[in-house]
Structure formats: C-alpha cells, structure tokens
Amino acid sequence: MQASCERVDEVSPADALAQHKQGALLLDVREECERATGMPAGAIGLAAGCLGARMEQIEPDRLRPILTLCGSGKRSRLAVETLRLCGYRYVRSVAGGIRRWKAEGLPLSYGALDVDAAERYARQLCLPQVGEAGQLALAAARVALIGAGGLGAPAALYLAAAGVGQISVIDDDRVERSNLQRQVIHTEARVGMAKTASACLTLGALNPRVRVYDCHERLQANNVDRLLANHDLVIDGSDNFSTRYLLVAASLRLRLPWVYGAVERFGGQVSVFDPRCEDSPCYRCLFAEPPPAAEAPNCTQAGVLGVVPGIVGLLQATEAIKLLLGLGDCLVGRLLSFDALSMHFRQTRLLRDDACPGCGSGAPSRDVIEVAHNKIAF
C-alpha cells in the first residue's frame, strides 16, 4: 500500500537497500549534525548544500545509480534535481527518508556514537553547534560539583542528562526533609542519607552512561587540590563564603574555571570566573573580603523560594555546557542577577581589579589566602 503512494522518482527504503547492495550509491544529504543520530549503513554523507561543489569528488561517474535520502524525503527530492542538473542520469529519492528507514528496521551506522547515545542525545546532536564532535567532547568532560543542594541538584541533573562524562559530587551534608522543597535530586525515602549518595542514585538512574563520583567530604584546605585536580571546571553550589574564598585560591592555582551561583529569598546571581582568560576577574574582585555574618544570612536564616535555586542552578549548568563546548558568550566579566518577583534579569559588568587581594599583581601567596579564609567562621 505504501509503495503505491511513492512518486516515480522515488524508491522505498527496502528497494533502496537492495539497489545499494547491487552497487548503487546511497547518499545521505542531511547536515552532519543530523547524521550523528544514525544514517543508513554504507551510505555516504554529503549535505544537500554541498552537492554541486563536492559530488564530482565523491562520484565522477555520471551513469552510476544514485539514491538520495534525508529526514523525511523532501530535501532528497530537491537533491535529485540538483544532481540531474549536474549531469547524473539515474538518481532517485528514498521515500520517507531516514524516519521510514528506521521504522522499517533497516541497518544503521552511528559513527563514533553507539545506538544508545545516538537515541539519548538525538535532540542535542541535531544542533549544528553540538553534533557528534560536541557530544563526544561532553562525554570526555569532567566537572566538579561543590554541593548537592539547591543549586547543585538542578545543575547536576541537566549536566548528567546532557551527557557530561564525569561528575564529582562533593558534599559532607545529609538529606533533611526541609531540603526537599528545592533540592530536587533527593527524595523523601532518602532523608538521613548522605547527599552525595542520594545524588549518585538519581543521576545513575537518569543516565547510566555518566560516571558519578561520591565525594562525601567537606572542601577544605587539606583536600581541595586532590578533589578539584583533573577536572575541566567546577560548579559552585556552596552556601557559605568560606568555601567560596577557598575556591578562589584553588581556582587560580589550578587554572580551573568555575561557575559561581548564589541565591537568597526571591533572587540570585550567576557569573563565571575563568583564570585561563587574562582579563577575567576573580570572585574577590567582586567581594574582596567576606561580609559580616549578619549581612549575609544563609537560606536557613533568610529563606528562599524553592524555584529560585532551580533557575540559578540551570543557568549554571548552561554556562558549564557552553564552556565545555566552547559555545557562545559566557558570563566571564559579567554578573547576571535575577529577581523572581519582578521576573527581571540584570547584567553588571565586572572588571578585573589590579589591587584585588586574590588575583591582583600585589596579591599574597595563594596558599596563604586559602588557609586564612578556610579558617573564617560563619
């Protein structure tokens, strides 16, 4: 029944496969990022827009039968016309494209990705800015996550879903019932469990391809290098200044970019501090010294609307993925502030301070900074 609806210049996927086995050239004319989700086994990939310029190199014989395939059959019919104008005489389109090819269970190839990855990341792979190369880069990436709480929970979920290969969850706290209002990586049944263990369970269930490391310990001067070394970036999901000032020194010493986030009540802020960039400020360019405890209450004291850490954590995950893929304009040198009540975002320019006690030219030893601020009590 299906065959009767096919055009004269079309062939069914099954017929295309049979003709391909007999010597016809099977040409996938989708974009490279689309082909990463799977293409007919044995097909050659060449985007429709490149046919006129490159087809001669792929097949100089104008008499060889050629079958074109795209996503649904529309671009492949246009490709037939292009190739005929180039002098190729026996060209036909595969009806229904790759969708019908897959639906009929015909053989596929996936390049460097396996079947599970091609299906799991299909919506990401079809983005030209990501594609197969970007997905492989994410799979090779290593992210250190400081805190499995309000910020770390949503960030971790989306990093794992995106296919970041390794996530090291660093936290010494345990799940409390009051956490569940915003820390969506945990469940009622895990109250009392270490947050790192709970996070590992959730992330493993979401994406078993991701390696999740349970680092149930507090970030301190005597373990910061061990915990953060050999990572590509760090996401700051902490809720205290002592950890952040510790991160300043470690980040500069290890040349490790970190994605900063903070929330309070109905608002939050996000930035990126990247010591690999010559003009990037550090956290102490923004907050040279920690404020008095009374001026910086934590969520327990000040409260927070549950969705706000979710929004800020997702912004952090977005910046992390951009950094890992080298995409877009990251928040280096900018502080993005968010107010949920007015639903307003505001950007503030951050400049590197040459007199900064953290990264300035006259800053003391970073080891001294680290130890000194690790002893601050909040």
Image (cartoon, rainbow, N blue to C red):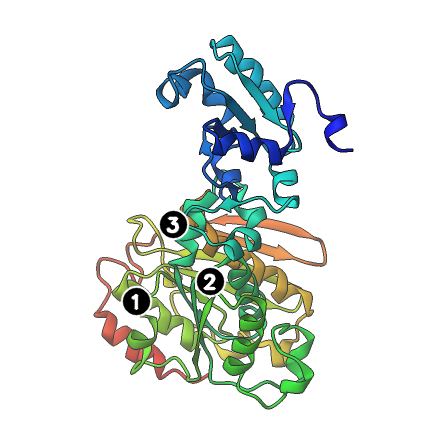
Q: In terms of secondary structure, where does tag 3 sit?
A: loop
Work out whether mark 1 precedes mark 2 in sequence or the reverse, and give the earlier one: 1
Residue at coordinates 60% horizontally, 73% vertically from top-left? 185
Q: Residue at the right extreme?
A: 1
Q: Find disc 3 in the rendering and name its residue.
A: 351
Which of these two is toward me, 355 or 212? 212
Q: Find disc 1 in the rendering and name its residue.
A: 230
Look at label 2 and name its amino acid: Tyr
Q: How many marks?
A: 3
Percent x, y of residue 140: 38, 58
Task: Work out whether 90 lies above or below 312.
Answer: above
Q: Find disc 2 in the rendering and name its residue.
A: 260
Look at label 3 and name its amino acid: Leu
Which of these two is toward me, 46 or 288? 46
Query: 10 Å neighbourhood of mark 2: few (<14), some, or many (≥20)?
Result: many
Work out whether mark 2 precedes mark 3 in sequence or the reverse, and give the earlier one: 2
Res 350 seen here: no
Percent x, y of residue 124: 54, 47
Image check: 349 left or right of 302? left
Task: Work out whether 262 lies above or below 224.
Answer: above
